[in-house]
Structure formats: C-alpha cells, structure tokens
Image (cartoon, helix red, strand yellow):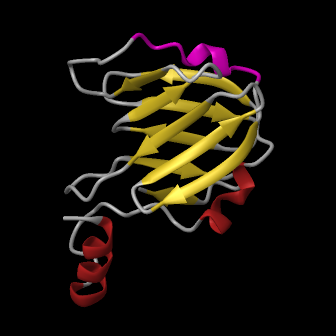
Amino acid sequence: MGWEAAIARKRLFGDTKAMHPFPDASKLQFLLGNELEQIGLGMWQIQLHFDFAHVSIGDDLEHADKTGVVRRHNTDNDRLAPILLHHLLGQKITKVEVEPFRLTLGFTGGDSLRIFSNEGPYECGQIYDKDGAITVF
C-alpha cells in the first residue's frame, strides 16, 4: 500500500497501527544546525546523538557520502553495507526534507542520510527534541 493510501486509511479508520509517517518538515526544523556528536550501534537500532536532539532508527537507513556513494543499512541480521557513519561526526544538519515514509537529513560536509519508515505494525524509530518531546515514526 502506498503512502497516500496509508494516510487515507488512517483518516477513515483511525490509528490502527503503531507506525506513523514522518510529520511535515516544518515540525522537524529544530533539527537544523544540530551537530552529530555520537553514534550508537545496537543490535536492533542505530542511534544518532546530536547536541540538541536524538534520533533512534530501527529500520532501514541510507548514507550517501559527498561523492554520491550510497550505503544502505538496516537492523536485520543481514547487514547490507559497511557502516561508515562516523564520517558524519562533527557535521551539522543543513537540510531537512520529508516524504511520508522517508526523512532526508543533509550535512555540512555534503553527506546525507535517508531514514525510512513503513506502515508495518512496529515503530521504526523516534526523534527527540532538546526538551524531550518525541516524534514516533
């Protein structure tokens, strides 16, 4: 089911699944200017700790480096690519773009991260602002 159908279904039947599409980009503008200070690699989650925000990713993630090479990561047993996210440490977010099931973050060094969500029965991650307000996707 496409994202348009998922949103229409939610309007008709209410929130019947734990998953949510990403909110409008205007609600995530607080991410701009945040510097990536720490990356946590867990069994089922990748965590990005910024100076004034935190993003937990439990689903697919793509890292496109400044040369355009794309490496796809996930939290399943079959990791898809070497994790080179440490190249983002010390970089600030310069761009926030949102589609219902994809969040793209651009960084000062020219790299970008595409964080994916889906409409499955489980959360794909969370975004916390500096006050601890949470956005679930």
Figure check: 2 above or below 86: below
Task: Looking at the picture, tell me which residue is in the foreground, 90 or 106.
Answer: 106
Extreme residue in the bottom direction: 12
On screen, residue 87 versus residue 43, left or right, reads: right
Viewport quadrant of the N terminus:
bottom left
On screen, residue 37 versus residue 41, left or right, reads: right
Viewport quadrant of the C terminus:
bottom left
Q: Where is residue 89 in the image (x, y as percent from the top left)?
A: 69, 20
Task: Looking at the picture, tell me which residue is in the foreground, 109 or 12.
Answer: 109
Q: Can residue 130 be seen in this view?
A: no
Res 37 → quadrant = top right
Task: Looking at the picture, tell me which residue is in the foreground, 69 or 106.
Answer: 69
Q: What stretch is highlighted in magenta?
A: 82-90
Q: Which residue is rendered at x = 23% and y = 80% of the image?
A: 9
On screen, residue 121 versus residue 109, left or right, reads: left
Figure check: 130 above or below 36: below
Figure check: 97 above or below 16: above
Task: Looking at the picture, tell me which residue is in the foreground, 126 or 83.
Answer: 83
Check if residue 37 falls in the magenta segment.
Answer: no
Q: Where is residue 27 in the image (x, y as percent from the top left)?
A: 64, 66
Q: Where is residue 94 in the image (x, y as percent from the top left)?
A: 76, 42
Q: Which residue is rendered at x = 37% and y = 64% of the image?
A: 20
Numbered-mark total: 0
